[in-house]
Structure formats: C-alpha cells, structure tokens
Amino acid sequence: MAASSFEDPAARLAAASRADTGLGCPSCGSSHVAQMLGDNGGVSYVCTSCGHSWS
C-alpha cells in the first residue's frame, strides 16, 4: 500500500545504514541516517542522531 500524504511523516522514514548507502551525516558524521520520501517524489535524508536533514 502506498504512503498517503495524511500519514505521520515519521511513519515514512526508511532506516538506512552507512554500509547499505555509503551515507554519513555531514554535520556530525554519524552513520545513523534515514531516508525520507517527500510528497513531490524527492528524496531527503535525516540524521537520527542529531536531527540534521539534507537532500
């Protein structure tokens, strides 16, 4: 079932690890990064350690 725009944004976070994606937070360097899907189909990332977000 596709995510609707009425769902809680936190429910749309998909956990990702540095081993899977090669991503790390540019702010704190943590490998605890989640991928966030935007309403317009874009992809953003958020650090679950410090809260920094980027795309």
Image: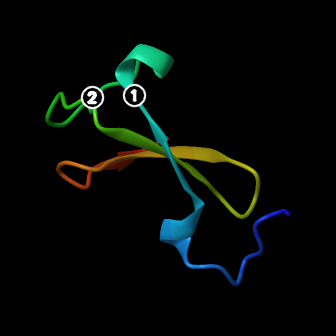
Q: Position of residue 13 (x, y in %)?
A: 52, 55
The residue at the far bottom in this view is 6
The residue at the far front in this view is 1
What residue do we see at 83% from left, 63% from top? 2
What residue do we see at 49% from left, 20% from top? 21
**Residue identified by numbered label 1:** 17
* Residue in the foreground of this view, choosing between 2 and 36: 2
* Residue in the foreground of this view, choosing between 53 and 19: 19
34 with respect to 31 (left or right)? right
* Residue in the foreground of this view, choosing between 16 and 36: 16
Q: Residues within 10 Å of mark 1 (few under 14, many from 20)?
A: some
Work out which quarter of the rendered image holds the N terminus and state it.
bottom right
What residue do we see at 36% from left, 38% from top? 33
Q: How is the image coloured?
A: rainbow
Estimate the spatial distance between the alpha carbons at disc 2 and disc 1, rounded to whole Å.
Answer: 6 Å
Count of numbered tags? 2
Q: Position of residue 12 (x, y in %)?
A: 59, 61
Image quadrant in which you'd find residue 25: top left
- Helix, strand or loop under label 2: loop
**Residue identified by numbered label 2:** 31
Q: Say which label, 2 or 1, has the lower sequence index.
A: 1
The residue at the far right in this view is 1
- Helix, strand or loop under label 1: loop
45 with respect to 2 (left or right)? left
